[in-house]
Image (cartoon, helix red, strand yellow):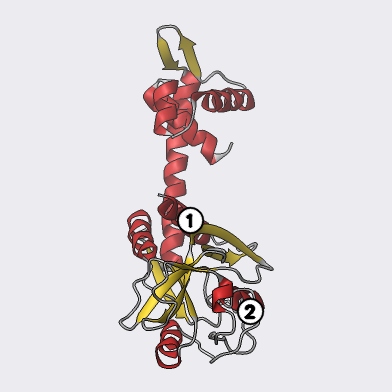
Amino acid sequence: MELRTLRYFVAVAEELHFGRAAARLHMSQPPLSRAIRQLEAELGAVLLNRSATGTTLTPAGETLLAEARELLDRTELARARVAAAAGPATLTVGLLGDSADLGVARLAAAYRDRRPDVEIRVRETDLTDPTCGLRAGLVDVALTRGPFDETGLCVRELRADPVGAVLRADDPLAGRTRLRLADLAGRRWFQFPEGTDPRWQAYWNGGARRQGPVVRAVQECRQAVLWNGTVGMAPLGHEPPAGLAVVAVTDMPPSRVVTAWNAGDPNPLVRGFVRTAVAVYGA
């Protein structure tokens, strides 16, 4: 007998109504009815009397209800004791230090509400590693931006942000409402250090080979624009600092906000984090 089936039976036995039990279990009634019938077949005993006037327990059902409650209670006790022996549950989340994304604050609040027992450790990385230390085993799950080499990783898109060119406020193009990549041809663009994921570099350089200063962080990129007139790129909706302007680039694909984790990672906390992230960013 599976513990899940026993939980189904206890819900029906306590409610004495399949509809109410299904609602309590957050499932539909047909699969619940099938599970109880299969349990009766496995035990070779009728557990419930079903009639037009209602549902009642048979003697066999009353016996199983007592046994199932005790077994489920012992299961929860065992789970609690194992958790206590293992120490506090922790999950290390890698964040790309690209901006103050409001989605991160909402995700933190939602996850804290759902799993107050889990300690979240945050590792923020610069722009040279879009996987935020995932491949090196420094984090369990990353909240970052694509594109990057996804080999060996699972990646789930959460949002797509249009992007714009970061320019000096006195740049002749800064007064435009929109630009195309051709408008920025011949300009110097920021570069990432050698060894940075080439897909990541190519995206932020508009898909072309560029020349320009090497930067590691968003602030360095902004300073390169401010001091040298270098072209930077940033998601729209991020208020630029004084002296800078952001103009939409219409022919550049949007920047994907994603969550990523190592394929095959059995950690249930990772799957729970991803489910929460999808729910929060999709709201």
Q: Residues within 10 Å of mark 2 (few under 14, many from 20)?
A: some
Local packing at callout 1 (Cα closer than 10 Å; few below 14, some 14-19, many 20+) is few
Q: Residue furthest right?
A: 151
How far across and down, in percent of the image, does residue 232 sit? 48, 80
Say if 49 sits above or below 107 in the image: above
* Depth check, front residue: 174 or 27: 174
Q: Is residue 250 above or below residue 132?
A: above
Residue 197's mark? 2
Q: Which circle marks residue 52 in the picture?
A: none
| Label 1 – label 2 distance at C-alpha | 28 Å
Give the SS element for disc 1.
Answer: helix
Residue 134 seen in the figure? no
Q: Which residue is mark 1?
A: 272
Q: Quadrant of the N terminus?
A: top right
Q: Which x, y percent locates residue 52?
A: 44, 6
Q: Position of residue 252 (x, y in %)?
A: 56, 66
What percent of the width, then of the height, locates residue 184? 54, 78
